[in-house]
Image (spheres, helix red, strand yellow):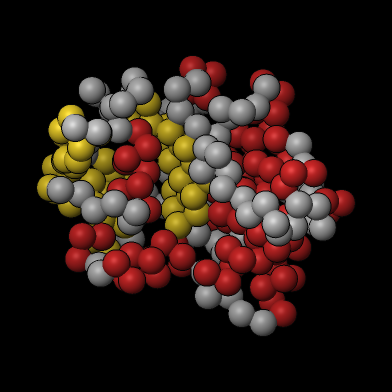
Amino acid sequence: MVELRGVRHAFRRGRDPVRLTFPDVDLAPGDHAVVIGPSGSGKTTLLHLLAGLLVASEGTVRVAGRDLATLTEPGRDRYRAASVGYVFQDFHLIDGYTALENVVVGLGLAGVRGPERAARARRTLERLGLGGRLQHPPRRLSTGERQRVALARAVAHGPALLLADEPTAHLDRARATDAMALLREVAVDLNAVLLVATHDPWVVEGFDRRVEMRP
């Protein structure tokens, strides 16, 4: 499902050149793994490569048989919309929209049309315990609720690859426990590959498989 071979990525951070080297990775459908390493080692960059937000400078990034480097930019957009769920560290919810509308917009980008779009968004939010918050904008939600909206948006289209960047960064331990349980539960239901980038030792302890980034 996910394969990395000989991947390197070069870019500039300000005026400084940066060259990251990534370990070879093989993940099958249903596999769960955590990405670990010090700040600046490339954890988020790895997720961006798998999501098609970046193209590796060298090597092969293959997801579900697709070599992402061979896709055009519109092709990567379509790949991401159809196959990837991404839970960003800062949620990236649209402030002027309700929780329901945020998920509906995500489904629209994934190509879901008609009445099914709102119905699926509602079902997903209700499943994540937000049935009473459908019409609330992000500013009226708690941090944990905003994260669940972000998760609903990421998974409502049934992605084969679920990526989460520091999903517990803004949460206390109780909410972090709930968040990780939800991520795992949804990934299991979808039989999706789950890849979580984190520096939280407690989160790391919950995974048997680890992808270790080195500076």
Residue ranking furthest to the right: 132
In front here: 153 or 183?
153
**Rendered residue at 69%/43% (across/down):** 146
Q: Position of residue 47 (x, y in %)?
A: 37, 43
Q: Is residue 21 above or below residue 138?
A: above
**Rendered residue at 53%/45% (across/down):** 87
Which quadrant is the C terminus positioned in? top left
**Rendered residue at 69%/67% (across/down):** 120
**Rendered residue at 25%/67% (across/down):** 71
Q: Position of residue 127 (x, y in %)?
A: 75, 53
Q: Is residue 159 above or below residue 176?
A: below
Q: Position of residue 35 (x, y in %)?
A: 38, 31
In front here: 111 or 31?
111
**In this orientation, does residue 188 appear?**
no
Left or right of 213 on screen, residue 103:
right
Which quadrant is the N terminus positioned in? bottom left
In front here: 28 or 23?
23
Left or right of 7 on screen, residue 206:
right
Left or right of 130 on screen, residue 190:
left
Tell me the quarter of the picture where residue 154 sits: bottom right
Residue ranking furthest to the top: 201
Tell me the quarter of the picture where residue 175 sits: top right
Residue ranking furthest to the front: 15
> Looking at the image, how many numbered discs can be counted on the residues?
0
Q: Position of residue 147 (x, y in %)?
A: 65, 41
In front here: 189 or 35?
35
**In this orientation, does residue 29 appear?**
yes
